Image (tube, helix red, strand yellow):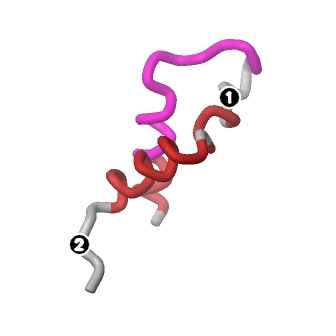
């Protein structure tokens, strides 16, 4: 009886609760944050799923 939800939406919802995407950083420099890095990571996770 759970509603159907898209995987990217679910990942962004879990990120809103836990902030798990904030611990992922750019490989070249840990302090550098790409613009919309979390969106790129979610796209990567969905493409690998």
Q: Secondary structure at mark 1?
A: loop
| Callout 1–callout 2 Cβ contact below 8 Å | no
Q: Splitting the image into 4 quarters, where does residue 5 fall?
A: bottom left
Which quarter of the image is occupied by the N terminus?
A: bottom left
* Label 2 CA crowd tier, 10 Å (few <14, some 14–19, many 20+): few
Would you place residue 11 above or below residue 16 in this image? below
In this picture, residue 31 sits left or right of residue 37:
right
Q: Which residue is mark 1?
A: 25
Circle 1 crowding by C-alpha within 10 Å: few under 14, some 14–19, many from 20: some
Nearer to me, 2 or 27:
2
Please give the name of the residue rendered at 46% of the width and 66% of the height, measured from the top-left corner: 49
Q: Is the residue 43 above or below the residue 31 in the image? A: below
Give the magenta-colored segment's residue range. Answer: 29-43
| Residue at image point 48% right, 60% down | 48
Closer-to-camera residue (33/15): 15
What's the mark number on residue 4?
A: 2
Q: Secondary structure at mark 2?
A: loop
């Amino acid at each position: 009886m759970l509603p159907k939800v898209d995987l990217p939406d679910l990942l962004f919802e879990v990120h809103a609760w836990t902030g798990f995407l904030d611990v992922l950083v750019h490989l070249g420099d840990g302090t550098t944050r790409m613009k919309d890095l979390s969106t790129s990571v979610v796209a990567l996770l969905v493409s690998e799923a």
